[in-house]
Image (cartoon, helix red, strand yellow):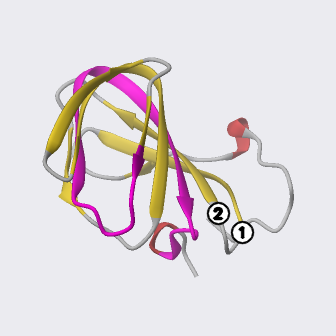
């Protein structure tokens, strides 16, 4: 995907890309300061524990997830949200198939091609 320099992104024109076993993502709008990404999980898919320097805010669009942040796990459902501080160890398990809408600041350069 090329760098988004426009103010609008259309879902029908944005491809899903693999992001792990049973996980795929769509990089939506972004600039150097902020990025929005939709992440779809099959039931049972695991977003392994990891950390990154970005601050992350996420919304459960669909499904049920067990979200772990800094050793605490909570079950979240549609409409629930969470915040991951910079460098906090976190991960997700899809209890049932679902979609997370992630927002990162600054943007995730590792999510886009050069």
For label 1, the residue is 31
For label 2, the residue is 34
Callout 2 secondary element: loop
Q: Is residue 94 magenta?
A: yes
Tags 1 and 2 touching, CB below 8 Å: yes
Judge whether 70 appears above or below 99 on screen. below
The magenta-colored residue range is: 83-109
The x, y position of residue 15, in whole percent, is: 58, 47
Residue 64 can be seen in this image: no
Tell me the crowding category of disc 1: few under 14, some 14 to 19, or many 20 or more residues within 10 angstroms, Cα based: some
Q: Residue at (23%, 48%) from the top-left corner?
A: 91
Q: Is residue 11 left or right of residue 54?
A: right
Callout 1 secondary element: loop
Q: Main secondary structure of the magenta part?
A: strand
Q: Residue at (56%, 65%) from the top-left corner?
A: 105
Q: Is residue 21 magenta?
A: no
The x, y position of residue 110, in whole percent, is: 45, 73
Count of numbered labels shown in the rendering: 2
Q: Quadrant of the C terminus?
A: bottom right
Q: Is residue 28 left or right of residue 59?
A: right
Residue 100, located in which quarter of the rendered image?
Answer: top left
Q: Residue at (32%, 42%) from the top-left corner?
A: 23
Towards the viewer: 101 or 4? 101
Judge whether 43 appears above or below 69 on screen. above
The x, y position of residue 73, in whole percent, is: 17, 35
Residue 112, located in which quarter of the rendered image?
Answer: bottom right
Name the residue at the left extreme: 71
Residue 42 can be seen in this image: yes
Q: Is residue 52 left or right of residue 45?
A: right
What is the spatial separation of the Cα atoms under label 1 and label 2, in whole angstroms?
6 Å
């Amino acid at each position: 995907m090329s760098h988004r320099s426009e103010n609008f992104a259309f879902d029908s024109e944005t491809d899903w890309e693999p992001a792990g076993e049973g996980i795929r993502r769509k990089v939506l709008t972004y600039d150097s300061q902020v990025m929005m990404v939709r992440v779809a999980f099959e039931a049972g898919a695991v977003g392994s524990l990891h950390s990154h320097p970005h601050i992350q805010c996420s919304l459960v669009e669909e499904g049920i997830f067990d979200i772990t942040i800094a050793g605490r796990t909570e079950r979240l459902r549609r409409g629930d949200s969470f915040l991951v501080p910079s460098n906090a160890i976190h991960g997700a398990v899809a209890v049932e198939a679902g979609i997370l809408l992630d927002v990162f600041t600054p943007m995730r350069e590792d999510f886009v091609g050069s």
